[in-house]
Image (cartoon, rainbow, N blue to C red):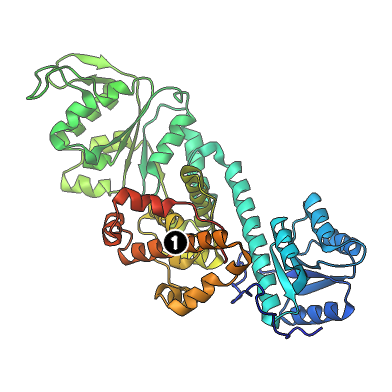
């Protein structure tokens, strides 16, 4: 049987381009060919071996199951019709034994409907005999193997995340993060003030929450305060409270945030932006363990653990006379330096998986995975906005990407791949062929539904690219209400042709 015979009219479309292998696993792909036709087995084995794959062969289903169990190949090419145990039975046995091997069914043209049902039963894909070309088989095997390795990578990341959940939302196992965890464990059950240092977006509040949650105060209030966000004239009132009539508009007495945190922890983020007058009162609170409301001479004793954070150089502020040196020493009893994301190596991969899982739960949509190219793009990017920027980039990609796999072009800074760039330019003929092929096997109503879903996906993705992610402007250009356009973007898509 020739591998280069043409496909009969009306047959399902072939895959067009082989994706690059998953870069996390450099081992050659291992494939098993299961077919009672000895000539075809030899042809497939020779062809796949020439492409750098390790190939096993089996002439029947029982032999195939023994080989799969012993060698654990990545992909099994299984003939649908064989004497004895047929392809359906082999596939069912593989699923029953939870064999970690992707299956591709091989079938004659008359069996296409049956093959489609086999895909629904767990096969990754099916190939129609006679094959259109060598590349058709290679592409199908490569895509199936990549799907398996993406799933394995996600599973490993999930296990790593579960093993370190003791630090709440802090994610990562790089040496620098392990150092952060050690400090958290060491200081959690003390009363010492802690100064958390690091660039904006590195997760300083998460460190503060982890310290609080591991302390004996975990069941008491945790009060985060963004010092930079409070108007200077209101800082003292917000932190320490005020009595009635203390200033214009103080129509009633009000407790401050320190009193609200009594028994627990207060987290002073961007503490370097506090005005000097507030720094004086904060120093007294740290030294005496009491607060005075604005307009009152009465001191009130409080029990509050103080954690502070800044992304500015406090020594430079001290030199400029805008930060008190005695307050600095009082806050900096113990310091934690959070590394920038670009210094955390493989943590980027773990964080990306963590955020994609969170987005899936929050939006109640199927989980998405990163292609190898997208993961490399994330690793190569310098991340000036650190973890916060990574989370926002993935949220954008999650919303705009309408397939299971996120590619570089779905990221705000990713370089489009050539075929995706052509599609982005809107080459009508190529887009039509890409979208319509494969739909003719569906009933008309289902095929029409898929085409409309694909149109929605392409239209919204293109208009969001054109407006650089500006939802309001995209809705205006689309002639839609903003809320309706947002719902269109978030609408779950069906599993159309890929």
In the rendering, at what x and y percent does residue 169 appear? 48, 41
Residue at image point 30% right, 63% down: 467
Residue 6 sits above or below residue 209 on the image: below
Say which quarter of the image contains residue 208.
top left
Residue at image point 30% right, 37% down: 329
In the rendering, at what x and y percent does residue 337 appear? 40, 47
Residue position marked by numbered label 1 in the rendering: 457
Does the rendering let one see residue 265?
A: yes
| Residue in the foreground of this view, choosing between 228 and 362 | 362
Residue at image point 43% right, 78% down: 427
In the rendering, at what x and y percent does residue 448 appear? 52, 62
Q: Residues within 10 Å of mark 1 (few under 14, many from 20)?
A: many
Q: Along the horizontal axis of the image, is 431 left or right of 437?
A: left
Q: Residue furthest left?
A: 248
Q: Residue furthest right?
A: 84
Q: Element under label 1?
A: helix
| Residue in the foreground of this view, choosing between 364 and 382 | 364
Q: Along the horizontal axis of the image, is 186 left or right of 157?
A: left
Residue 346 sits above or below residue 83 on the image: above
Residue at image point 54% right, 51% down: 367
Say which quarter of the image contains residue 343.
bottom left
Q: Residue furthest top?
A: 298
Residue 272 sits above or below residue 212 on the image: below
Q: Quadrant of the N terminus?
A: bottom right
Does the rendering let one see residue 28?
A: no
In the rendering, at what x and y percent does residue 196 appear? 37, 42
Q: Along the horizontal axis of the image, is 186 left or right of 110?
A: left
Q: How many tags in the picture? A: 1
Q: Residue furthest front?
A: 444
Residue 91 sits above or below residue 10 on the image: above
Q: Quadrant of the C terminus?
A: bottom right
């Amino acid at each position: 049987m020739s591998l280069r015979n043409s496909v009969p009219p009306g047959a399902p479309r072939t895959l067009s381009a082989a994706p690059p292998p998953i870069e996390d696993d450099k081992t050659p792909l291992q494939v098993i060919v299961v077919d009672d036709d000895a000539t075809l087995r030899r042809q497939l084995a020779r062809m796949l071996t020439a492409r750098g794959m390790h190939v096993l062969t089996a002439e029947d289903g029982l032999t195939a199951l023994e080989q799969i169990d012993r060698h654990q190949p990545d992909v099994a090419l299984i003939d649908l019709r064989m004497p004895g145990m047929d392809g359906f039975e082999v596939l069912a046995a593989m699923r029953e034994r939870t064999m970690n091997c992707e299956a591709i069914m091989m079938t004659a043209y008359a069996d296409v409907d049956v093959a489609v049902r086999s895909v629904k039963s767990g096969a990754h894909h099916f190939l129609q005999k006679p094959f259109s070309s060598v590349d058709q088989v290679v592409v199908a095997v490569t895509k199936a193997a990549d799907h398996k390795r993406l799933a394995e990578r996600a599973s490993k990341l999930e296990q790593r995340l579960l093993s370190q959940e003791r630090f709440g939302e802090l994610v990562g196992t790089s040496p620098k993060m392990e150092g952060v965890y050690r400090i958290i464990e060491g200081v959690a059950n003390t009363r010492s003030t802690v100064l958390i240092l690091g660039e904006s977006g590195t997760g300083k509040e998460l460190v503060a929450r982890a310290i609080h949650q591991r302390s004996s105060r975990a069941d008491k209030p945790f009060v985060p305060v963004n010092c930079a966000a409070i108007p200077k004239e209101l800082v003292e009132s917000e932190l320490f409270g005020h009595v009635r009539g203390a200033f214009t508009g103080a129509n009633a007495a009000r407790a401050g945030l320190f009193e609200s945190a009594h028994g627990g922890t207060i987290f002073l983020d961007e503490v370097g932006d506090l005005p000097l007058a507030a720094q004086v009162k904060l120093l007294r609170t740290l030294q005496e363990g009491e607060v005075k409301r604005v307009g009152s001479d009465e001191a009130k004793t409080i029990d509050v653990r103080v954690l502070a954070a800044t992304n500015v150089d406090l020594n430079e502020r001290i030199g400029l006379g805008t930060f008190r040196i005695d307050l600095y020493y009082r806050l900096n009893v113990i310091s934690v330096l959070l590394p920038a994301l670009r210094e955390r190596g493989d943590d980027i991969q773990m964080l990306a998986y963590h955020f994609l899982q969170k987005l899936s739960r929050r939006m109640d949509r199927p989980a998405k995975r990163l292609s190898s190219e997208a993961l490399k793009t994330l690793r190569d990017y310098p991340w000036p906005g650190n973890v916060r920027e990574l989370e926002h980039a993935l949220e954008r990609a999650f919303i705009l990407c309408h397939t299971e796999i996120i590619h570089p072009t779905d990221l705000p800074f990713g370089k489009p791949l050539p075929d995706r760039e052509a599609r982005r330019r809107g080459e009508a003929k190529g887009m039509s062929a890409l979208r319509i092929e494969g739909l003719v096997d569906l009933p008309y109503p289902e095929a029409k539904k898929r085409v409309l879903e694909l149109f929605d996906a392409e239209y919204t993705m293109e208009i969001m690219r054109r407006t650089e992610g500006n939802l309001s402007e995209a809705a205006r250009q689309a002639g839609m209400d903003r809320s309706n356009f947002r719902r269109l973007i978030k609408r779950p898509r069906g599993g159309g042709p890929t």
